[in-house]
Image (spheres, grey):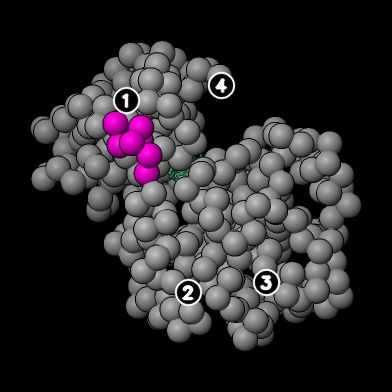
């Protein structure tokens, strides 16, 4: 971050403020980890923070410290709008374009308070007074740790803040396996463990807390998988009927997309998930190595993300969408 920006933010935070903290729609471990980590940091510094998520976060994150205090815009528009309008500072974390908050964009775009963005996605938009954007980081949570250090407040990081930061680093790095995981990432993790963060418990809470329905849904997705060996690609689908038949809850499909990459020789995977309410097919893409799924999602499926993990959507039927995907893949030289 620029030294002038750090100084300006230090000045802003030098007296107690009402502060809104916002993750992207469909918040994941990094979005919740960074917003809740910042929430606890600001509370400890005598501010009045509120985390406002555009919509519900998945059940597997409800153990996170402060999760019960998160306001959900879609469920309580009146109250959330009031909090946003009264906020003196707005933090947006783990996204960099206002359309990522869905219908909440209308409210955010008319607020006058200064925005502070902390984010690791490509191509940041220009809405924030202070932008800390860096695609070299594997998670917003690792950037939040740096942000607190930049402010000269490292000693404020305790087990609670550390637990939130740990969660985002763990989930966005694929349990420390993705390429942006560095020695520094591990040194931060080591410090968090020394602060008491329960590194052997958190992964269980996140990944080993499944319902039987979720396992059956995973089984169905694996059965539905189509492998295009020649094109080093595998993809799978889940229709709304399949989701419903396994009593699907939010978060159940998280991570399923990665299974395709565990097949020898496969470097590109996708999952297509029907959402009848929103009348879309939500798509996740993952790759290994140089194949840029961010570009692929931007070019063909109205989405974006990072080089090895991106998402997008389609308003066509499932069959049309997967057909388009197959046609595209067959014309790529992967
Ligand atoms: P996931 O597949 O886990 O939902 O998302 C993977 C990555 O792609 C995340 O970093 C997420 O922020 C980004 N992403 C997912 N869906 C979209 C989308 O519709 N638009 C954009 N711009 N990015 C997305
Ligand atoms: Mn992230």
The answer for how far apart the CA atoms under marks 3 and 4 are is: 35 Å
Q: Looking at the picture, how far across and down is residue 331, in whole percent?
A: 23, 27
Q: Which residues are magenta?
A: 210-216
The answer for how far apart the CA atoms under marks 4 and 1 are is: 17 Å
Q: Secondary structure at mark 3?
A: helix
In the orientation shown, which residue stands out farthest toward the front? 212
Q: Earlier in the sequence, mark 4 or mark 1?
A: 1
Check disc 3 and report the residue beneath it. Answer: 41
Q: Earlier in the sequence, mark 4 or mark 2?
A: 2
Q: Earlier in the sequence, mark 2 or mark 3?
A: 3
The answer for how far apart the CA atoms under marks 1 and 3 are is: 40 Å
Q: Is residue 61 visible?
A: yes
Which quarter of the picture shows residue 116? bottom right
Looking at the image, is mark 4 or mark 2 nearer the viewer? 2
Q: Looking at the picture, how far across and down is residue 113, in whole percent?
A: 84, 55
Q: Earlier in the sequence, mark 2 or mark 1?
A: 2
Tell me the quarter of the image containing the C terminus.
top left
Looking at the image, is mark 3 or mark 4 nearer the viewer? 3
Check disc 4 and report the residue beneath it. Answer: 278
Residue 119 located left or right of residue 246: right
Check disc 1 and report the residue beneath it. Answer: 237
Check disc 2 and report the residue beneath it. Answer: 197
The answer to whether marks 2 and 3 mark residues whose Cβ atoms lie closer than 8 Å is no
Name the residue: 29% across, 44% down. Answer: 258
In the displayed structure, would residue 240 be above or below residue 13? above
Query: Which numbered circle lies on residue 89?
Result: none
């Amino acid at each position: 971050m620029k030294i002038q920006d750090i100084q300006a933010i230090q000045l802003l935070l030098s007296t107690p403020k009402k502060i809104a903290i916002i993750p992207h729609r469909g918040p994941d471990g990094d979005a919740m980890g960074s917003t809740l980590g910042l929430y606890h940091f600001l509370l400890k510094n005598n501010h009045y923070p509120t985390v406002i998520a555009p919509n519900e976060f998945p059940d597997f994150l409800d153990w996170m410290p402060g999760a019960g205090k998160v306001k959900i815009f879609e469920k309580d528009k009146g109250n959330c709008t009031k909090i946003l309008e009264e906020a003196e500072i707005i933090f947006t974390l783990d996204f960099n374009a206002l359309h990522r908050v869905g219908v909440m964009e209308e409210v955010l775009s008319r607020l006058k308070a200064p925005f502070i963005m902390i984010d690791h996605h490509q191509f940041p938009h220009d809405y924030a007074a202070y932008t800390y954007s860096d695609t070299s980081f594997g998670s917003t949570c690792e950037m939040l740790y740096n942000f607190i250090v930049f402010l000269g407040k490292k000693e404020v990081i305790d087990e609670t803040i550390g637990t939130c930061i740990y969660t985002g680093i763990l989930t966005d790095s694929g349990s420390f396996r993705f390429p942006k995981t560095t020695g520094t990432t591990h040194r931060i993790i080591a410090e968090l463990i020394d602060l008491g963060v329960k590194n052997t418990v958190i992964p269980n809470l996140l990944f080993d807390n499944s319902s039987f329905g979720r396992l059956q849904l995973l089984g169905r997705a694996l059965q539905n998988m189509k492998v295009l060996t020649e094109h080093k690609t595998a993809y799978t689908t889940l229709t709304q009927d399949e989701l419903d038949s396994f009593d699907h809850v939010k978060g159940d499909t998280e991570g399923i997309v990665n299974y395709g990459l565990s097949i020898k020789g496969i470097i590109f995977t996708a999952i297509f998930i029907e959402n009848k309410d929103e009348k879309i097919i939500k798509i996740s893409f993952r790759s290994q190595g140089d194949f840029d799924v961010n570009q692929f999602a931007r070019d063909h499926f109205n989405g974006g993300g990072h080089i090895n993990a991106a998402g997008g959507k389609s308003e066509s039927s499932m069959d049309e969408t997967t057909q388009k995907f197959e046609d595209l893949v067959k014309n790529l030289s992967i």
